[in-house]
Amino acid sequence: NAGVTQTPKFQVLKTGQSMTLQCAQDMNHEYMSWYRQDPGMGLRLIHYSVGAGITDQGEVPNGYNVSRSTTEDFPLRLLSAAPSQTSVYFCASKSPLAGVAGELFFGEGSRLTVL
Amino acid sequence: EDQVTQSPEALRLQEGESSSLNCSYTVSGLRGLFWYRQDPGKGPEFLFTLYSAGEEKEKERLKATLTKKESFLHITAPKPEDSATYLCAVQAGQTGANNLFFGTGTRLTVIP
């Protein structure tokens, strides 16, 4: 059972380039989300989805785009990368049985550097 | 504004030396308080959820408690494998049902 899988693990981009961070889960979780983690700051929610076809913004959505066409996948797109988007990105999912305040399962992270 | 503050930022303990980590919070309508463990280069791993003041949860050498203003993660007789960053997060009515608000963590080092 793989859990939450993120790719790539590391990526270096130049300012203005676009890319997609991939996230897949095999636990049949309806809720999926993207967080970013920066030094000296807590994890911050970027976007989340409560099911296929449904997405919503989190705390820091600017510069990012998401879509959810299947239950398993929740890609995060950077439209035009900026140095401020240098961060470690985590995808997380939650079981529909967990309730509102349920535990999140996190992937291992994708470390992005924007030059 | 919702706030979560963890202290200390870093803590070094000798193996077997018990201590506590603190998470103080200011939120409107707490739905749940979470503790996660994060190893270097890994994603956070769930430890506990606490829902109301007075609640306690235990797992091996860890015990989490909750009051109306703060939560403590007590570590009894820690071992080197307990070394990690411990994150506290809250889910509150004002931030929405689908947003966890995280603290910056306490980095724990247990020395053999």
Image (cartoon, rainbow, N blue to C red):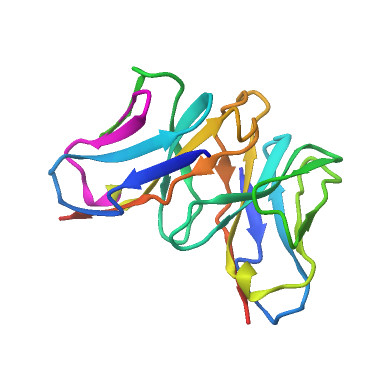
- Residue A2: in sight, yes or no? no
x 36%, y 37%: residue: B24
Residue shown at 35% from the left, 38% from the top: B23
Residue B80 among those drawn in magenta: yes
Q: Is residue A68 left or right of residue B77?
A: right
Is A2 left or right of A38, judged from the image as shown? right
Q: Is residue A86 visible?
A: yes
Q: Measuring from the top left, give residue B33's x and y in whole percent.
A: 46, 31
Q: Is residue A12 positioned above or below B67 on the image?
A: below
As for residue B99 lying within the magenta part, the answer is no
In the shown orientation, is residue A82 left or right of residue A102? right
**Residue that protrudes farthest toward the front in the picture:** B1
Q: Position of residue B13 (x, y in %)?
A: 17, 51
Count of numbered labels shown in the rendering: 0
Q: Position of residue A65 (x, y in %)?
A: 79, 57
Query: Which residues fall within the magenta stretch?
Result: B64-81
**Relative to residue A111, is residue A52 depicted above or below?**
above
